[in-house]
Amino acid sequence: MTEQKAIIDTGWNFDNSYARLPEIFFTRLNPTPVRSPKLIILNNSLAASLGLNAQALECNDSVAVFAGNRIPEGALPLAQAYAGHQFGHFTMLGDGRALLIGEQITPQGERVDIQLKGSGRTPYSRGGDGRAALGPMLREYIISEAMHALGIATTRSLAVVTTGEPVIRETELPGAILTRVAASHLRVGTFQYVSRWGTVDDLRVLADYTLQRHYPEVDADENRYLSLLQEVIKRQAVLIAKWQLVGFIHGVMNTDNMAISGETIDYGPCAFMDAYDPATVFSSIDIHGRYAYGNQPHIAAWNLARFAETLLPLLHEDEEQAVKLAEDEISNFAESFHRNWLTGMRAKLGIFNEEPEDESLIEGLLSMMQKYRADYTNTFRALTFDEKPEDMALFGTAEFAQWHEQWKERLSRQQEPKDSSQQLMRSRNPALIPRNHRVEEALEAAVERGDYSVMERLLDVLSRPYAHSPEQADYCTPAAPSNRPYRTFCGT
């Protein structure tokens, strides 16, 4: 069997629709080869869903593909151009260390991007080296797969390879490349880039492409660009509500990190909240709390407003009327988000129907959780099984006892029996999340000692967050109290 035949047998089935767009959108470029790539982890279940042969993906020829040393047949690598507001400041960006190698057409006929992250310098690298360190790539693998298991729309990770070459950050670190799978890498920042440096015709081409790829059901609408805005707002309202419902903090909600598809993208300084506090920030660079947990819905609305601004020339020929249309739609985000969040919170409390006082009941619980620094995930897990853990101060208070009685009364007013409420709660309240200390434990073992067994065990339990099984117990415990707040880093 020839080397080329071995690559074909892996199941790659590429198309390159993005490469057929005007050249202002990208730069064609091959990855920069690396010295001695080694496969660290492969996502077998994802590979199968993509129509790929997982066994063949472990051979040297396929590892060379994941490393950027070999271009599979049908691939057409390119770096995408985009811009973005980073912490509120607009700048030119682009794929500075990533390449889209092609779009895999799955056996189900779905089209997904296959991107190599850490594959070398591009024209958009600015001062960067185009590379990535092993730790941040493994973090993205862990968190993105956990998000998928939690039922939250997300890009996913197919593989991580080490490069055999160091990258220099504050210290010398092992280099790595992540293979990321996404519905697409179209971002709010993609539209911002074309709006700033392209023509209206370029913008229309991008909007039409987005409609055909992600929202074909509204492509024939009378004002399809207004429909595009509406659909993106809807998906983001659902997405951000799901983040809030599991205590996920993205950490860097710049406009270039908001995907038009409605997927979570870019797992840099992300983390999950332990003690409930809307002001929680983990990112080392978010010194003013712009992207704090409680601010995420507001930032999403701000980002969507920037997206709407790019569409103004397409929404209406009269600028004033276009602005009015955009403002009306953006104003709907808060209500849509709140509706999704409230529905999700009702489910977390086992509530099937709606009553006007539900929001007061929910806010009362959250207020107590903040006051007593109750663990977010474990509080809802305890409520699911109607337990009162002695190690959580909240459950021993008179305030909670009064709230608990109100909650029970609320459940008694619905038709569904207690068993149904508990089943609903089991399906909405995860037994565990990627606890920050557990993630760090896995990364340290992998990066410092070359021991990937800790990460493999973590990934295994995270793959079934709603199982509520005994073997998950050790992964449910928060980190021990510390005087040093937990901090995450972008890993660029």
Image (cartoon, rainbow, N blue to C red):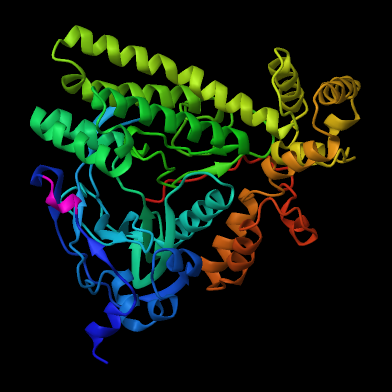
> Where 4 falls versus 418 (above or below)?
below
- Name which quarter of the figure residue 8 lies in: bottom left
> Where 268 falls versus 178 (above or below)?
above
Q: Nearer the viewer, residue 72 or 366?
A: 72
Q: Nearer the viewer, residue 156 or 283?
A: 156
At 48% across and 18% down in the image, what residue appears? Answer: 334
- Residue 241 lies, in percent from the top left, at 54, 31
User: Does residue 36 show up?
Assistant: no
At 59% across and 55% down in the image, what residue appears? Answer: 439
At 31% across and 48% down in the image, what residue appears? Answer: 184
- Residue 41 lies, in percent from the top left, at 47, 70
Q: Residue furthest bottom?
A: 1
The span picked out in magenta is 17-21
Prevailing SS of the magenta stretch = helix
- Residue 113 lies, in percent from the top left, at 31, 55
- Residue 267 lies, in percent from the top left, at 45, 47
- Name which quarter of the figure residue 368 lies in: top right
